[in-house]
Image (tube, rainbow, N blue to C red):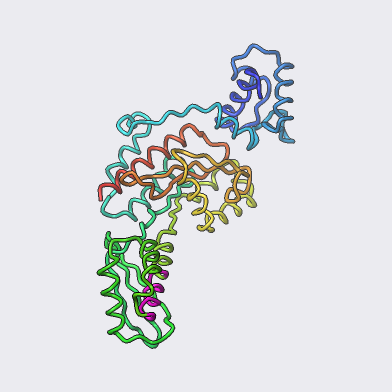
Amino acid sequence: MLDDRARILLKALVERYIADGQPVGSRTLSRASGLELSPATIRNVMADLEELGLIASPHTSAGRVPTARGYRLFVDTMLTARPLDLDAVQSVEPELVAAREQLHPDQPQRVIAQAAALLSSLSSYVGVVSAPRKAGVFHHIEFLRLGERRVLVILVAPDGDVQNRVIFTARDHTQAELLEATNHLNAHYAGLSLEEVRSRLRGEIDALRGEIAALMQAAVDAGSEALAESSDHVVVSGERNLIGVQDFGNDMGSLRRLFDVFERKTDLMRLLDVSSRAEGVRIFIGGESQVVPFEQLSVVTAPYEVDGRVVGTLGVIGPTRMPYDRMIQIVDITARLVGHALSLR
C-alpha cells in the first residue's frame, strides 16, 4: 500500500504526463503536487514508485512516466469522473447534444455508424461500436426446395429482419414435405427463441416423422448460425487519428500492430462482449487483455441498453496517455444516447 504522500505524487505525475506528454521531473512534480517537499525527498519517493513498477524512467530523460500498472492504480483509486445527466451535457460536450438530434431511430445501422463517428470525433481517437445482438426469435419460417438435397431456409424476425441459409439434407424432400415442416413450425413455435425451439423439438422428436424432425432441427441450427453471424458486427471509426498521436506517430511497428487489432474484428467483438457483462464504464489498459496486447493502448467501454436489456457495447480506443475522466464521460453519455435512440424504434 502507498502512503498518502506517495499517492499524491503518483496522481500528480500521471495527470501531468497525460497533460504534457513529457517525462515528469522532481521539480515539476513538486509544483504540481502542492507538497512542500525537498527535491531529494521527491526523488526518493519516485525511486520507491519505480521499484513498485508504477513509474519508469526513459533512457533519454531524468523524468519519469507512468507504466500500465501505474495507470491502473490511478484509474481504479484516484480518478474522479462523475456521470453526467443527459440534460446537463450542453456546457461540457455541446457536440453530444447536437448529435442527439441526428440519431435516426428508424435506421439502427445508421445509429451505430453515427455513434462510432461521434466517439472518434469527440475523443480524437478511435470509436468502436458493436451492433445490437439479435434476440434469436423468429416470427415466420419458410422452406424452399433449391434442388436435390438442397433447401433454402428463410427466417423472418419480429422486427422484419430476414435471414437466409442454405442447408443440405440427408435425402431429397418434395415441396409438399417442406410445406408440411413450414406449417408445423409456424403453427407451434413462432414467437419462441431458437433455443426454446431446439429444446422443444428434442422432446417432441418421437411424435414427428423422422425426416421432418431432422429437417426442422437442421433449420434451427442454420438459423442460430445466421443470427450469430448477423450480430457479429463491429463498426470502427477514426483509425487514422492514431497516426497523429505522439505516442504512436514515430513508431511504425506500433502503428502496424494497432491496425492489425482493428482488422481482427472477432477480437474486438470478444473485448466488447466482455465489456457488455459489466455495469457501466469499464477501462482496459495495455497488456491486461490479449486483445490489447501492448502497453501503449487503452480502451474505455460501456454497454448500451434498449428497454432495460443490454444489446451492445461501444467505446474509445487510444493511447494509455489519454484523459480518462473525459473519455469516461464521452463513452457513458454516448452509450445512453444510443440506447435512447434505439428504444424509440
- Tell me what residue is drawn at x 59 percent, y 29 percent: 14
Image coordinates for residue 229, horizontal then vertical, percent: 43, 63
For image coordinates 46% across by 36% down, the residue present is: 328
Q: Is residue 5 above or below residue 66?
A: above
The x and y percentages for residue 156 are 29, 66
Task: Report the residue that reaches farthest toward the top.
Answer: 36
The correct choice, above or below, for 333 with respect to 264 in the image is above
Please name whichever residue, 240 or 199, is drawn nearer the observer in this view of the structure: 199
Q: How many numbered marks have been drawn onto this rendered protein structure?
A: 0
Is 215 within the magenta?
yes
Instruction: Identify which residue, 87 or 22, lies in the foreground.
Output: 87
Q: Which residues are magenta?
A: 210-221
Return the x and y of residue 53 as percentages of the image width and height: 70, 33
- The residue at 43%/54% (across/down) is 235
Q: Quadrant of the N terminus?
A: top right
Residue 142 falls left or right of residue 7? left
Picture coordinates of residue 60 (x, y %)?
A: 73, 35
Vertical placement of residue 4 versus 58, above or below: above
Viewer-proximal residue, 209 or 232?
A: 209
Locate residue 43 relative to residue 213 in the image: left or right.
Answer: right
Is 182 part of what is drawn in magenta?
A: no
Relative to 123, say whether 238 is above or below.
Answer: below
> Is the magenta region chiefly helix, strand or loop?
helix
Q: Which of the 4 quarters of the picture holds residue 184? A: bottom left
